[in-house]
Amino acid sequence: MTEGQILNTNFLITRKTSYNKKLMIKSLIILKYYLSLLTSKYLYIGNSFKIMSKMGVESPDIMEVSRIRVAMILFIVSSILTVVSLFGSFSYIFSLASSSVLNVPLIISVIISGLAVGGSIIYIISLIMMRRGFKRLREYGRDVGIGSAGSLVVLIGSIISIVSYILAIVIFVIFLTSASYSLNISTYYTLLSGLGASYIIYLISLLIVVIGQILLGIGFYKLGSVYNDSTTEIGGILIAIYILSFIGAILAVIGTGNILSKLRAGFVPQPKSYSYSQYPTQYPGYPPPNVPQVPMQPAVQNAIKSNGVAIVSVFTNYQVAAVSAQILGTNFSTTSISPNVLNPGTNVLTINFNTPLNLTVGITYVIRISLSNNTFIDVNAVYQV
């Protein structure tokens, strides 16, 4: 090879390297843009929920069912992004194995990585939102707490799975990039052991995710039962079946949409009625015992102030926790109740709705206090300035 040919070859290599660096910079800028876009969208959704909650625009049921529905939409989006990125990643790895890196442009590989990272971020966000939605509904007296536990278990399993993916990818890259070099036997077995460890970690994470999705599916089934929606119930059943979870998620989105329509039309889920009688079975000839009932609370000394604080007197026959309170016929609700544990007898509660109330002076309103045993107490209170 002549000196001119060598110089020409070096020039082409330098030019190609410079071009790849420019592509890398542009790709990183694009990746940063999409990640910031995803983050801003999540912050926007979160802030919207906070603003609506403070303004009292929506009831607690509507707020939290909406949160769960948005979480399921994000779950579907993340699943699509993950599938696309997996196909792209495999094609890129095979191109590395065939020593033809230039067959896949650098910008495409970065976009594929961005899709994988973005899908993982959206997936984790969806699980966090889902857990909070189920948890808040449980605090409002809805029997869906298992959905919160399921979301947490799936989140833990997913994080472990991501760790196993990263470990496997690192080992694959070391194998492929070292193909032209001689690896000593100890290094080879170390890498092989690491690959086996990543596979075992993945199997453990998969088991955790499957268990979590069963719990999550039960949570969605109960959500449909509470709000009387069969589509959500069917979605919950399919979510519990791992390979059908994507279809279940779509049905859950449709079902929660139906639930929101019902709630906005005035549907109120009725807590289950439990009998607290501890008496034995009655037989003919014996009069039934006088089982204590929780009566409608008297309006004496019960007042709702314009500053958003209500002071009410509540009677109960047993110890129970006060979970939330809502002024019926309005959008005002809260979980700020002090004391939040009711003892047998008369209890004086201070309920803070955390916002000024613009009601009609002198009118008696009904405050519904939801209890931890999935029942409620209605209290009459007069609005005062």
Image: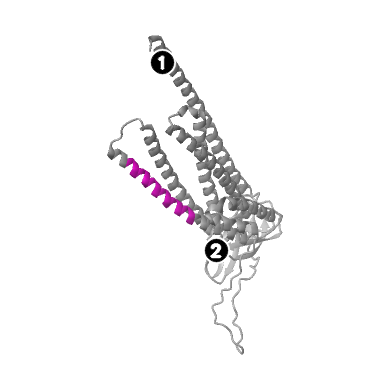
- Where in the figure is residue 326, as x and y percent of width and height? 63, 58
Q: Residue at x 55, y 80 (%)?
A: 279
**Mark closest to the chain's N terminus, 2 or 1:** 1
Q: Residues within 10 Å of mark 2 (few under 14, many from 20)?
A: some
The residue segment tinted magenta is 190-211
Q: Amino acid at mark 2?
A: Ser
Residue 124, above or below 333: above
Q: In which quarter of the view is residue 288 placed?
A: bottom right
Q: Is residue 194 visible?
A: yes
- Where in the figure is residue 156, as x and y percent of width and height? 45, 50
Q: Residues within 10 Å of mark 1 (few under 14, many from 20)?
A: few
Q: Is residue 229 visible?
A: no
Label 2 – label 1 distance at C-alpha: 76 Å
Q: Amino acid at mark 1?
A: Asn
Q: In which quarter of the view is residue 186 placed?
A: top left
* Residue with the most extreme bottom position: 285
Q: Which residue is mark 2?
A: 372
* Callout 2 touching callout 1 (CB < 8 Å): no
Magenta stretch encompasses residue 192: yes
Q: Residue at x 30, y 35 (%)?
A: 183
Q: Which residue is mark 1?
A: 10
- Where in the figure is residue 258, as x and y percent of width and height? 67, 54
